[in-house]
Amino acid sequence: MTQNPPDLRPDLAHARVPRAADAARPGQPTIGMVSLGCPKALVDSERILTRLRAEGYAISPDYAGAEAVIVNTCGFLDSAKAESLDAIGEALRENGRVIVTGCLGAEPDYITGAHPKVLAVTGPHQYEQVLDAVHTAVPPAPDPFVDLLPATGVSLTPRHYSYLKISEGCNHKCKFCIIPDMRGKLASRPAHAVIREAEKLVEAGVRELLVISQDTSAYGVDIRHREDRGHRAHITDLARDLGALGAWVRLHYVYPYPHVRDLIPIMADPASGLLPYLDIPFQHAHPDVLRRMARPAAAARTLDEIAAWRATCPEITLRSTFIVGYPGETEAEFQTLLDWLDEAQLDRVGCFRYENVEGARSNALPDHVAEEVKDERFARFMEKAQAISAAKLEARIGQRIDVIVDAVDDEGATCRTKADAPEIDGNLFIDAGFETLEPGQIVTVEVDEASEYDLWGRPV
């Protein structure tokens, strides 16, 4: 079993390969895929692989078995860019024929300057250009009588959970972020298309739907919350419709608009299917820092909103991410953030050290914070967050809760509670009585041990 990552960095890129790659038939062209970055990029990778499978390509789980490799990159931070360049270099060394796509693909000269031998570079969600590049490198040779595509397409996640992208792009202009430049303005999918995809996933055995976008609570704003085929493109309506499908529904990247409060009563209803879980990127708490970020500067009102959410839904889990060492951040401003965290008592917290990103407006701000100060503030922030998390999890000892089983091995079962999203939050481990458990099962356990981020329990 794997323990929860100690630093909970939400920006770390996890390389992905297809969970299942069928043996290629004789003469079948074969493509490999390395997917880096956030769940939104993961969905893009799944769509590319699904299209390739539909055209008769086999998917290879390793470099040696592929005639070419697609690397879907992350370009949000300079550290993520460096990791993407490393992944491209590894693919070139191991395979030699590499097509690059994803967020870093928006900077083709940056990629070809480091790796001039790549076959092609395309930007984020440019599916047709990726396919064109694959066709050029490895011509398709489909056999419609043999090449069968699963109804749910190719997945890079375990069979029992799946990411569900509801929109692309973002209308915000945060000074530290270049995502709107890379992925464009908000573009929502029609609600009926989202629901149909979710229905197919649930029919195929998915037990948890993880709703993602750049700004989930803005869903439908660009299409004026259009209603089509009985489904309205508004996050509240979508949450109800998805919850009715019988799977857990978890919301990620929810911007704290006032209408978010309308989601809380739905979460408070155990029969709704909508998990009592909100992933909200607050980023900071001091109003002056928030203004320099070009974000709403209302941390005090946010505390009131959090209190109202908890009054309506006491079981709600709040996850957020913050930036320390933002340009101009003083010790007093950082202390305000720590004090706010004490008051907010968030359940799940991640932290970034501020980094310049090419093209971000924050680069030009005065009074950049020294790296050693960022490191010291990061350590103090995480110490505070860990203490809050440890106390909250300690209070769960003796409780009976439902968990979803992610993996089972000889040592035990790795599970998650309703308060835990895959890979970024904690786990609940079962090390006795796990022998009959299988991934995707939802079982009731009694918690008997806790650490800073993880729980241990036994089936009841």
Image: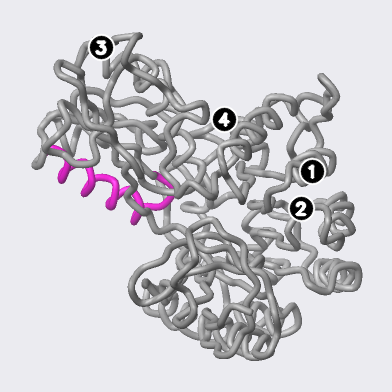
Residue 184, which numbered label?
4
Q: Residues within 10 Å of mark 2 (few under 14, many from 20)?
A: many
In front: label 3 or label 4: 3
Kind of residue at badge 3: Pro
Q: Is residue 118 above or below residue 309?
A: above
- Quickly name the residue at label 1: 244
Lower sequence index among marks 1 and 4: 4
Quadrant location, the C terminus: bottom right
Instruction: Tell me the quarter of the picture where residue 145 sits.
Output: top left
Front label number (2 vs 4): 2
Residue 204 seen: yes
Whether residue 171 is situated above or below residue 133 in the rendered picture: below
Q: Earlier in the sequence, mark 1 or mark 3?
A: 3
The amino acid type, in three-letter code, at marker 1 is Ala
Distance in Å between CA atoms under marks 2 and 4: 32 Å
| Distance of label 1 from label 4 (alpha carbons) | 32 Å
Disc with the residue nearer the chain's start (1 vs 2): 1
Name the front one of labels 1 and 3.
1
Q: Which residue is mark 2?
A: 273
Does residue 368 appear in the picture of this structure? no
- Kindly state the secondary structure of the residue where label 3 is placed: loop
Q: Please state the extent of the stretch shown in magenta in the rendering.
A: 75-92
Q: Is residue 221 magenta?
A: no
Q: Name the spot of residue 247 as percent of width and height, x first.
A: 68, 49
Residue visible at 71% across and 31% down in the picture? 195
Density class for disc 4 (Cα within 10 Å; few <14, some 14-19, many ≥20) is some
Q: Position of residue 452 (x, y in %)?
A: 53, 85
Q: Which residue is more in the foreground, 357 or 397?
A: 397
Quadrant the N terminus occupies: bottom left
Label 1 element class: loop
Q: Which of disc 4 and disc 3 is earlier in sequence?
A: 3
